[in-house]
């Protein structure tokens, strides 16, 4: 007997069955498989016996051992009064259980675990690789998730579902080339859906030539259900090249024909409903609902009524916006609910406002906590504008989150947009760092805003304001947000505790558009802080709730064993409360730190740059800041917060304050 076999039997004797199976993986042996099967039979472990049968079948397909072991496993299952694989379905709970085991194993051992997982679910009733992919997508640990997908791809190298999920993870780290290559591979073995995904990806990442070729392929296909993907195309229509603009009517025609001739199909009705909602064709949707069964119609009408409730008065101009979408002679709505063409409105000296209706009303599947605030803000914007006698509203659809064409060159309102140059006739709406509020800026939001690069408006706003008023405003913000633990996103109630001094680094989403304004990313900041942090000072890190970056998650995993780094999910307010300073690229958490009166060091353009303690553009600047003594300019903090709260941000439901802001904007533009 060899030394290896002795070690194998020793592992079986002491109950280290997983290690024994790993040895079989490395050195397949029928003799060892039979020996281990005896241990499983003695323990009445039918599940492990079935897994072992799968291994035998894989390594020794011509041997009857696997079939014998399978029969013994089934017999043992029946003897125990249960069937392991009927009672243990492929569920998230089972996958997560395996993940917990995998977290303690090396990458090489994960191969073994995933193979066992495959064996378990392919032996009977087949294995649904797409279902497993969807379950793994719900795992919060991005490192584990990515490694699982890589291993799955090893067994299924051309599976489009796995390739798509790997592409999405690559995109989260802004690896554009890698993500595009994976998407292109996925499209070779998939339905139309991934072609649409690829086209949108290429348009959003400046690959116009490739996008035109992909669009040609989409047009060449005649699959009728593909028209339900039309909203994906519409989302990037603001970025179209002249060639794509010329080709777009063909897809429009196909979709209109599909809707007109729609016949109820249980399989695609949800996709049909969602497509019409995303395209804002609500009247057509109501007509189409007359063709569906009563129970389905009742549920769909309930959902549609909920959308109309969210829209409020804006619901009355959806059809007009649809009309303006396809006509060059734009029609506007007056305060008396009359319609007037743009040319006549100009001749009459009326103020024409391009009112872009954003996607937050129509994309329920992409809902975020702040969207309810934006919807409320927009409803009030419309109601106030509609009540002004000298205003003509020209409703238009904003299908893209970040882009809206300035059609008429008149006054305009859009959401989550920005421009390179300040345009006082245009306001960009964005949810504020202050929960329940929004901002209106003539250049953009956050680091793109006018206040990020021009502090004069802050100084002008606080000129003549007494010190007591500044202090009272600070106290009010502290009561409303800090003491009540209110933030842009829901915060944990658990309080953070740390012995000794520490600085706080809130991480950011790498794909956030404001990331392009950073000299140092949050990941680079983290690495600089770890490298330069002096003795006696710790670094507390909190991952962004929407972060799915593999590189950030891997970095945090590696730092878990660093005694000077603490990774926590506690409330940002409780972390900030005890910190020496906050280091951030341009996160909204930096603004929240100002409400605590803390020094904030930034490495990117930010709307609160005026009150920042310092700007970081290199590892050396981080080192200098760490040794600077962390001094905050309290007077600047007080001034900035007063300006932001009293003159810049406005509560979404404060109609009077919003009307004052709107009239001020329109009056400034007059001059």
Image (cartoon, rainbow, N blue to C red):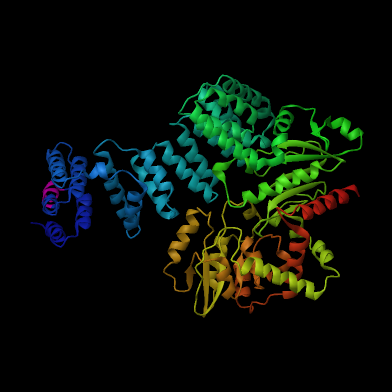
Q: Do we see residue 208 in this rendering? A: no
Q: How many marks?
A: 0
Residue 42, compared with residue 599, is above or below; it is above
Q: Position of residue 177 (x, y in %)?
A: 53, 44
Residue 229 appears in the rendering: yes
Q: Spot the residue most to the left.
A: 1
**Residue toward you, 440 or 200:** 440
- Magenta-span inclusion, residue 34: yes
Check residue 442 for magenta coloring. Answer: no
Residue 452 to residue 307: above or below: below
Residue at point 61% right, 73% down?
581
Drawn side of residue 562 relative to residue 75, left or right: right
Percent x, y for residue 506?
Answer: 56, 64
- Secondary structure mainly formed by the magenta segment: helix
Left or right, 262 with respect to 311, comes to: left
From which residue to which does the magenta span run? 29-35
């Amino acid at each position: 007997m060899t030394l290896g076999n002795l070690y194998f039997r020793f592992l079986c004797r002491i109950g280290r069955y997983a290690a024994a199976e790993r040895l079989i993986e490395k050195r397949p042996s029928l003799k060892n498989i039979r020996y281990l099967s005896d241990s499983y039979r003695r323990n009445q472990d039918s599940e492990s016996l079935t897994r072992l049968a799968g291994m035998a079948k894989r390594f020794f397909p011509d041997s009857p051992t696997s079939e014998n072991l399978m029969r013994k496993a089934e017999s043992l299952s029946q003897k125990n009064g249960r069937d392991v694989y009927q009672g243990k379905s492929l569920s998230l709970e089972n996958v997560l259980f395996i993940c917990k085991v995998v977290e303690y194993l090396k990458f090489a051992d994960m191969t073994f675990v995933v193979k066992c997982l495959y064996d378990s679910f392919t032996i009977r009733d087949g294995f649904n690789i797409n279902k497993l992919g969807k379950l793994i997508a719900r795992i919060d640990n991005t490192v584990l998730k990515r490694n699982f997908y890589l291993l799955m791809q090893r067994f299924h190298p051309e599976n489009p579902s796995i390739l798509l999920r790997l592409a999405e993870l690559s995109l989260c780290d802004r690896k554009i080339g890698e993500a595009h290559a994976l998407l292109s591979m996925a499209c070779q073995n998939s339905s139309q859906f991934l072609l649409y995904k690829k086209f949108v990806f290429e348009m959003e990442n400046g690959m116009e030539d490739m996008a035109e070729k992909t669009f040609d392929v989409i047009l060449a296909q005649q699959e009728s259900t593909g028209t339900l993907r039309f909203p994906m195309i519409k989302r990037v229509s603001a970025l179209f090249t002249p060639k794509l603009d010329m080709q777009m009517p063909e897809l429009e025609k196909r979709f209109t024909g599909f809707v007109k001739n729609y016949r109820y199909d249980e399989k695609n009705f949800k996709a049909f409903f969602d497509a019409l909602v995303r395209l804002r064709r609500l009247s057509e949707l109501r007509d189409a609902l007359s063709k569906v069964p009563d129970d389905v119609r009742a549920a769909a009408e309930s959902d549609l009524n909920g959308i109309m409730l969210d829209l409020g008065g804006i619901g009355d101009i959806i059809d007009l916006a649809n009309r303006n979408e396809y006509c060059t002679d734009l029609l506007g709505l007056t305060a008396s609910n009359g319609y007037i063409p743009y040319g006549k409105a100009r001749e009459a000296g009326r103020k024409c406002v391009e009112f872009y209706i954003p996607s937050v009303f129509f994309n329920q599947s992409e809902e975020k906590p702040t969207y309810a605030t934006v919807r409320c803000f927009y409803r009030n914007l419309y109601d106030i504008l509609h009540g002004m006698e000298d205003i003509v509203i020209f409703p238009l659809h904003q299908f893209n989150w970040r882009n809206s064409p300035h059609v008429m060159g008149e006054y305009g309102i859009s959401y989550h947009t920005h421009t390179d140059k300040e345009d006082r006739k245009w306001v960009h709406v964005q949810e504020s760092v202050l929960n329940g509020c929004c901002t209106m800026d003539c250049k953009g939001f956050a680091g793109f805003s006018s206040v990020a690069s021009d502090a004069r408006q802050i100084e002008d706003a606080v000129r003549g304001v007494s010190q007591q008023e500044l202090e009272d405003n600070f106290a009010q913000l502290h009561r409303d947000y800090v003491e009540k633990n209110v933030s842009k996103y829901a915060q944990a109630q658990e309080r953070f505790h740390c012995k000794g001094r520490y600085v706080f680094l809130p991480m950011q989403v790498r794909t956030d558009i404001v990331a392009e304004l950073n000299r140092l990313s949050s990941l680079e900041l983290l690495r600089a802080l770890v490298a330069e942090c002096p003795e006696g000072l710790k670094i507390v890190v909190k991952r962004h709730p929407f972060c799915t970056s593999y590189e950030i998650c891997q970095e945090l995993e590696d730092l878990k064993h660093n005694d000077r780094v603490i990774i926590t999910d506690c409330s940002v307010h409780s972390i900030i409360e005890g910190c020496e300073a906050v280091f951030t690229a341009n996160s909204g958490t930096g603004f929240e730190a100002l409400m605590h009166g803390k020094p904030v060091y930034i490495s990117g353009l930010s709307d609160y740059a005026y009150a920042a303690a310092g700007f970081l553009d290199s590892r050396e600047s981080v080192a200098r800041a760490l040794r600077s003594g962390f001094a905050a300019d309290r007077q600047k903090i007080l001034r900035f917060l007063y300006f932001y709260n009293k003159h810049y941000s406005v509560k979404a439901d404060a109609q009077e304050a919003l009307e004052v802001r709107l009239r001020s904007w329109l009056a400034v533009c007059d001059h």
